[in-house]
Image: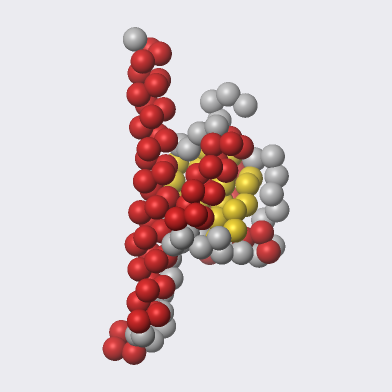
Amino acid sequence: MAGTKTAIVTGGSQGIGAGLVTAFLERGYRVVANSRTISKSNAFHGSEDLALVDGDIGQPETATKVADTAMSRFGSIDVLVNNAGIFLVKPFTDYTTADFNALVSTNLAGFLYITQLAVKQMLSRHVRDRAIVR
């Protein structure tokens, strides 16, 4: 489908993320939705326009799998919504090292990993498209 845009939504299995996945699909986007267990969440079922990628976005391998899925299934990454995040419901003074590492992994490292991959693809496409226009 020429001209169709592709969106990646991390944290797409519930709440705002699930709402974004639905909204993008309703607007004709192809979507790659990610969460730790999105395929088991029953929030969505994969389809021609929806790819589900399980995994912790705080792991570089998951970010690579998400970006690779967008490119191999849909041929582009046009929109990235970094929605994945965790919040611990306890006083900051009670955080453990494991709690801190989980927060940094999902909320910071995950953002970095997937954003780097998406922006690299977007920039390479922009340079390629500019060369074609000239």
Residue 47 position, x and y percent, is 70, 44
Snapshot quadrant of residue 71: top right
Is 21 placed above or below 96 here? above
Q: Is residue 113 left or right of residue 10?
A: left
Display coloring: secondary structure
Residue 126 position, x and y percent, is 37, 26
Is 13 placed above or below 64 here? below
Residue at the extreme bottom of the image, as rendered: 94
**Residue drawn at 35 percent across, 85 percent down:** 95
Residue at the extreme top of the image, as rendered: 134
Snapshot quadrant of residue 98: bottom left
Q: Is residue 37 left or right of residue 112?
A: right
Viewer-closest of 20 and 36: 36
Residue 9 position, x and y percent, is 50, 51
State whether residue 16 appears in this view: no
- Count of numbered marks: 0
Residue at the extreme left of the image, as rendered: 93
State whether residue 64 appears in this view: yes
**Residue drawn at 62 percent across, 26 percent down:** 1
**Residue drawn at 45 percent across, 55 percent down:** 60
Is 45 placed above or below 92 here? above
**Residue drawn at 37 percent across, 46 percent down:** 116
Residue 68 position, x and y percent, is 53, 42
Viewer-closest of 122 and 61: 61
In the rendered image, the quadrant that contains the C terminus is top left
